[in-house]
Image (cartoon, rainbow, N blue to C red):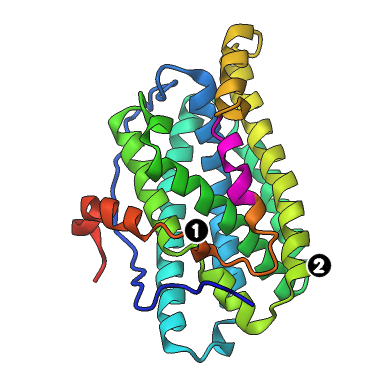
């Protein structure tokens, strides 16, 4: 039995942003560090196709939802994810302009999504979205809760990632709540998470390696060791997320068991002028 539900009255509304990213984008915009920069760049490569998939998987079940509050949250979820895709398309174009082969990285992801949409049931497609939304939610929480992870990044990139993290936090339970209404099979959710974990780590690693190779930095042993400690060390970015990641496998898990409404209140004012009303 679930011990937490989505907060009643939670408003999920997209914000119309125009970051007008620097052209050219600073090659190593995060602290002058290629490893940190390309970690975030590699995640950005995944977002346009991934977020369109998330939208499509939720839309498959929208007609089965009768709860007016959840329907409104679905509308907000679709709006937010659509805006994320648009901004990351521009971001990824800046990466192309720097000489990175973004098409080479995007095409396998796109092919995998098409395979899933053709071969997997609608419930299984939605379960994949639930799994990836948990990933983005815990990453977003870390960025909002611990600004140190973006310390040293250029102001425009800090703001872009803060905005994305804020909206991922707001809508983190929408796909989950839809899934529990229309299916509810936790075994499918767990299987989807194991697969999502494998492909997320694989895709991000491949993206980082490609960009570091293009920069001629794969042979920089000190940078690589420092970067791996930043990511996987005792207090590394991923290491700190292991506990909240594993919560997903609990039989009573709900995304809002990780209650970070206070973070929303803290950060939402920064982007209030951009809300689409």
Q: Write down the quadrant of residue 183 in the picture.
A: bottom right
Residue 119: mark: 2
Q: Where is residue 96 in the image (x, y as percent from the top left)?
A: 51, 32
| Residue depth check, mark 1 versus mark 2: number of the one nearer the observer | 1
Q: Write down the quadrant of residue 228 in the picture.
A: top right
Q: Where is residue 34 in the image (x, y as percent from the top left)?
A: 51, 19
For mark 2, does the 10 Å Cα neighbourhood hold few (<14), some (14 to 19), or many (20 or more) residues? few
Q: Can residue 60 be seen in this view?
A: no
- Picture residue at 76% right of the left edge, 53% below the top: 195
How many numbered badges does the structure rendering display?
2
Residue 274: mark: none
Q: Examine the residues drawn in magenta and state their main secondary structure.
A: helix
Outermost bottom residue: 66
Residue 258: mark: 1
- Picture residue at 55% right of the left edge, 61% below the top: 52
- Position above or below: 244 against 256: above
Left or right: where does residue 254 sit relative to residue 140? right
Q: Is mark 1 on a helix, strand or loop?
A: loop
Magenta extent: 236-245
Q: Position of residue 260 (x, y in %)?
A: 40, 57
Q: Is residue 134 visible?
A: yes
Q: Quadrant of the C terminus?
A: bottom left
- Picture residue at 77% right of the left edge, 74% below the top: 121
- Position above or below: 257 against 136: below
Q: Is mark 2 on a helix, strand or loop?
A: helix
C-alpha separation, residue under disc 1 versus residue under disc 2: 33 Å
For mark 1, does the 10 Å Cα neighbourhood hold few (<14), some (14 to 19), or many (20 or more) residues? some
- Picture residue at 65% right of the left edge, 83% below the top: 182
């Amino acid at each position: 039995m679930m011990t937490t539900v989505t907060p009643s009255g939670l408003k999920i509304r997209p914000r119309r942003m125009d970051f007008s990213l620097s052209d050219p984008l600073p090659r190593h915009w995060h602290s002058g560090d290629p490893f940190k920069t390309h970690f975030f760049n590699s995640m950005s490569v995944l977002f346009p196709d991934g977020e369109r998939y998330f939208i499509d998987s939720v839309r498959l079940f929208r007609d089965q939802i009768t709860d007016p509050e959840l329907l409104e949250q679905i509308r907000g979820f679709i709006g937010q994810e659509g805006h994320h895709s648009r901004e990351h398309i521009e971001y990824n174009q800046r990466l192309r302009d720097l000489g990175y082969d973004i098409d080479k990285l995007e095409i396998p992801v796109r092919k995998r999504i098409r395979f899933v949409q053709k071969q997997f049931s609608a419930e299984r497609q939605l379960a994949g979205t639930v799994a990836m939304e948990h990933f983005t939610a815990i990453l977003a929480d870390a960025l909002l809760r611990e600004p140190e992870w973006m310390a040293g990044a250029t102001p425009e990139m800090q703001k872009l990632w803060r905005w994305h993290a804020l909206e991922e936090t707001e809508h983190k339970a929408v796909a989950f709540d839809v899934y529990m209404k229309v299916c509810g099979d936790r075994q499918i959710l767990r299987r989807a998470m194991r697969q999502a974990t494998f492909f997320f780590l694989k895709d991000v690693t491949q993206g980082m390696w490609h960009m570091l190779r293009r920069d001629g930095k794969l042979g920089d042993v000190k940078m690589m060791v420092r970067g791996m400690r930043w990511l996987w060390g005792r207090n590394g970015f991923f290491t700190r997320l292991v506990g909240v990641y594993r919560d997903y496998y609990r039989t009573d898990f709900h995304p809002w068991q990780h209650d970070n409404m206070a973070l929303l209140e803290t950060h939402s004012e920064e982007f209030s002028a951009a809300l689409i009303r």
